[in-house]
Image: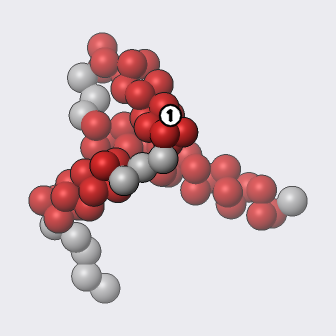
Amino acid sequence: MSTLSEREMRQRIDEEILNATPEFLQIIQKFDQENQLNYSTIYEIYSTIINSEKTISAKSKQK
């Protein structure tokens, strides 16, 4: 199984953010504001959001 290089992953995230819905951009903005003092990058924030959505989605499928 091949993995994306860090650069390719960042490019992919950039494209997804540029094409995101207004609702998803609001979620990113909220996480960004909450994590500014932690010096988290947009890529770390994006990963956190995606992982939390996967967890929520998996839990809802189990019910």
Label 1: which residue?
Answer: 27
Is 20 left, or right, of 54 in this rendering? left
Is 55 left, or right, of 2 in this rendering? right
Is 54 left, or right, of 63 in this rendering? left
As drawn, 45 above or below 47 = above
Outermost residue toward the right? 63
The N terminus sits in image quarter? bottom left
Residue 7 in picture, x, y percent from top left: 12, 59
Outermost residue toward the left? 7
Q: Pick whichever, 47 or 21, lies toward us.
A: 21
Q: Residues within 10 Å of mark 1 (few under 14, many from 20)?
A: few
**Residue 13 in view (yes/no):** no
Outermost residue toward the top? 37
**Residue 9 in view (yes/no):** yes
Q: Pick whichever, 16 or 32, lies toward us.
A: 16
As drawn, 40 above or below 56 = above
Residue located at (38% from left, 44% from top): 46
Residue located at (25% from left, 74% from top): 3
As drawn, 17 above or below 39 = below
Residue located at (58% from left, 56% from top): 54
Which residue type carries mark 1? Ile
SS category of the residue bearing label 1: helix
The C terminus sits in image quarter? bottom right
Which colour assignment does the render follow?
secondary structure
Residue 50 in picture, x, y percent from top left: 48, 51
Residue located at (27% from left, 56% from top): 15
Residue 28 in picture, x, y percent from top left: 43, 35
